[in-house]
Amino acid sequence: MGISERKLRHKADLKKEILTAARELFTEKGWESTSIRNIAEKIEYSPATIYLYYKDKNEIIFDLHREGFRLLVNYLDVLKGVKNPFERLQAMGRAYIRFALENQDTYKLLFVMEEPMQHVASCATMDWDEGDKAFNLLMNTVQECQKQGHFTNLQTINLSFVIWSTMHGLCTLRTSGHLGHVSLVRNSNHNLDDVLTAAYEEFVKMLEQLNN
């Protein structure tokens, strides 16, 4: 490997370190309470090094959102080979749950934390489509279901929002710890992931009823 290749790899690795440290600090301390200096201290570099890659926290949070949505799309995109759209829709729900549980800091940053959203919006440009792509994968699958006779009496975009909102609610209850405080769950001693899965399967049954 030549010098230029090593420099590029070092740059990519350091940028990844910055984003990882920032994501952990934002979810642990909050957006307002985290400074560039905090991030630099966590990766044991000077703040000046951070500024070589990002001019401020806005750019960091924007990159974290782009990275997070790309990861979510990867979880969903692997299901495009499932030819039956209703089966694909069910699988997408399970993949969404897996994404939330396996990447809890990222999930909270994308969908739970309120503080950074105005900064993400201030950085967004017309070519920032990661978030739209994730939702469009869902909406396109719903459209395919409708073409095969499912949900024919429902509006595509409205049903897509209902499905996403339900998934978001289930996953947020789980990742925030609130699911464990529900009395029915607390008194039953059930595993929380099992409760989440069971709730999702009941939701699938509701969708199936809409087809009848």
Image: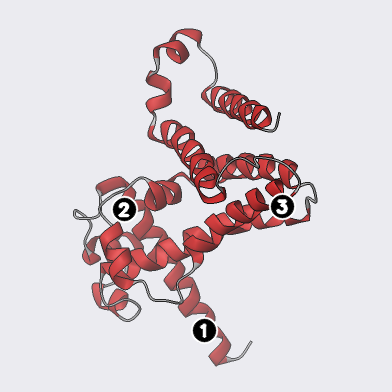
| Residue identifier under label 1 | 8
Q: How far across and down, in percent of the image, does residue 159 sit?
A: 54, 43
Q: Look at the image and name its color scheme.
A: secondary structure
**Which numbered disc covers residue 79?**
3
Which label lies toward us, 3 or 1?
3
Query: Secondary structure beneath disc 2?
Result: helix
* Dot 3 or dot 1, earlier in sequence: 1
Q: Residue furthest top?
A: 187
Tell me the crowding category of disc 1: few under 14, some 14 to 19, or many 20 or more residues within 10 angstroms, Cα based: few
Q: Amino acid at mark 3?
A: Leu
Residues at marks 1 and 2, CA–CA distance in whole angstroms? 26 Å
Looking at the picture, tell me which residue is in the foreground, 37 or 113: 113
Q: Is residue 145 above or below residue 44?
A: above
- Do residues under tags 3 and 1 come within 8 Å of each other at their CB atoms? no
Q: How far across and down, in percent of the image, does residue 169 sit?
A: 44, 35
Residues at marks 3 and 1, CA–CA distance in whole angstroms? 33 Å
Looking at the picture, tell me which residue is in the foreground, 97 or 138: 138
| Residue identifier under label 2 | 25
Q: Amino acid at mark 1?
A: Leu
Looking at the picture, tell me which residue is in the foreground, 126 or 64: 126
* Dot 1 or dot 2, earlier in sequence: 1
| Quadrant that contains the C terminus | top right
